[in-house]
Amino acid sequence: MVKHFDTSVELCGVRLDNPVIPASGTFGFGREFAEYYDLDCLGAISFKGTTRDARFGNPTPRIAECSAGLINSVGLQNPGIDKVIAEELPHLRQIFHKPIVANISGFSLEEYEECCAKIDKEEQVEIIEVNVSCPNVHNGGMSFGTQPESAAEVTRRVKAVTTKPVFIKLSPNVTDIVAIARACEEAGADGICLINTLLGMRIDTMRRKPVIANKMGGFSGDAIFPVAVRMVYQVANACKIPVMGCGGVSSASDVIEMMMAGATAVQVGAANLKNPYAAKEIIEALPQEMERLGIERLSDIIGIVK
Amino acid sequence: MYKKGIYTVLSNEPLTPAVYRMVLEGDTQYITRSGQFINIELEGKFLRRPISVSDYDATTVTIIYKVVGRGTEQMKGMAAGQRLDILTGLGNGFSTDNGTERPLLVGGGVGVPPMYNLCKRLLAEGKRPMVIIGFNTKEEVFYFEEFKALGVDVYCSTADGSFGTKGFVTDVIREEGLVFDYLYTCGPLPMLKALYDATEVDGEYSFEERMGCGFGACMGCTCKTKYGNKRICKDGPVLKRDEIVW
């Protein structure tokens, strides 16, 4: 008898065929990957971080390789919310027929509000993911995500303008991730996504200069997986709302490990940049890994490790 | 279109003390234009290594690379028979359907390799290309004889004058009084800029930038052009003269 392995999960009422979601910023709006494979195998897609206005981002070079990862300081290059809604979203809907997660960034509370209010009207978007790692231009550039109060304030303002499930994507560059996650939950967040990149830096020793023009950037890739698992575990145990795990996931085994830590869905980021088929290959490997570990329903193992 | 595949090293030999030529066997159907590049996965390295295609045919790809860091150091030690995971067919490449009859091809250092296949293609299309290759010193010179063997006028400059014209590629244009109707070039940024300033003839310039993915997803290598932001890896590496912002 052929065993059936149920990989489906439910995220705030949104059913996903499987928990694997390409992470924002590593998958554009799907175009480049659609040339490689049929995107409908994916659980969902989290599209490129979108801001109110079009952004070029930071000066180049803005990529630095590391052992088991890379640092990027792309700086939220995107065409702006209006163009995303007018051009990218309709195109993404043509090439992808599963849930879309809209990743929204902002440099002020008003910007978050405005972008989320616009996305709220888009039927194609099932979930809003709010990136609170950006600096607040009205508060000396301090990131919204580094204080429970400011993260909660973004959450409240965004929740007030949308009825879609709102996930707050947290930065790991903080002293107490649990306090921030709880503050978001109390402010009405429907879920937490973590982790964003770790702040890192490389130096070109021959030139005696930073590799990246902006000096520092976000470190991602295999190397950060243990940090992500730890934070997912801490937050999942402290909050009642679902968690999307993200950070250094590169195999089906990693997906299961992160789900055991407490993630309901799992994002794959930097792995897509090394191997454009990464997310697809991870999904295809899930049943075999489930069989190996004696798992029939993936949803059974969410947060099973105490 | 581009494609990921497994390629086998057929040969890997030095052309100069620092520059190597590697011939790979595998599916080349996605390489469609001169000036495109491939992106090679190396064991133990997180990012792939983007290297321009110097030449290709139905079953092989030839790349010429300079050993500049740990990745290319690793490549230098590869022997025939080694298998590599490679993305092919990346980048826009040079156009040849632009009406040119007498194009000038200028390569500087490791910007020389993509000019080789381009030269062959232009010849096959009945054009009459001229070639200038530029280096710092005689010890670095490669492919002078290979270009000559194609039957084209080929000039070489070295900064120290140890081979060919003393000076830069722009000195060759001036001293030889070269007349051309289109320019194709690839090489270090100062050379591209010097060429841009030295001529008003239309052309295509191939740029370099530190890349993440190499296929347009990460936005790591974006540059500004007169017609908006472009990703060097996906919308480039070749930019038309009229869109370049220095």
Image: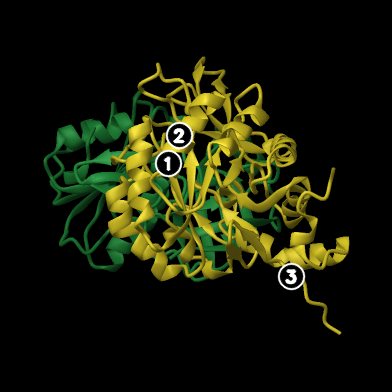
Chain that the image shows in green = B
Residue A102 relative to residue A269: left or right = left
Q: Chain of mark 2?
A: A
Residue type at the position of mark 2: Val
> What's the chain of the residue with tag 3?
A
Q: CA distance from mark 1 to mark 3?
A: 34 Å
Question: Where residue A299 sits: x, y (%)?
Answer: 74, 61
Q: Position of residue A69 (x, y in %)?
A: 63, 38
Identify residue type, mark 1: Val
- Which residue lies at the image location 54% right of the left edge and 40% below the top edge? A169
What separation in Å lies between label 1 and label 2 (alpha carbons)? 6 Å
Query: What residue is shown at x 41% (from left), y 63% (from top)?
Result: A124
Q: Is residue B174 visible?
A: no
**Relative image position of residue B163 (x, y in whole percent):** 37, 31
Question: Answer yes or no: do the residues labelled 1 and 2 have beta carbons within 8 Å?
Answer: yes
Which image quadrant: the C terminus of chain A?
Answer: top right
Residue A136, located in which quarter of the rendered image? top left
Q: Position of residue A89 (x, y in %)?
A: 36, 59
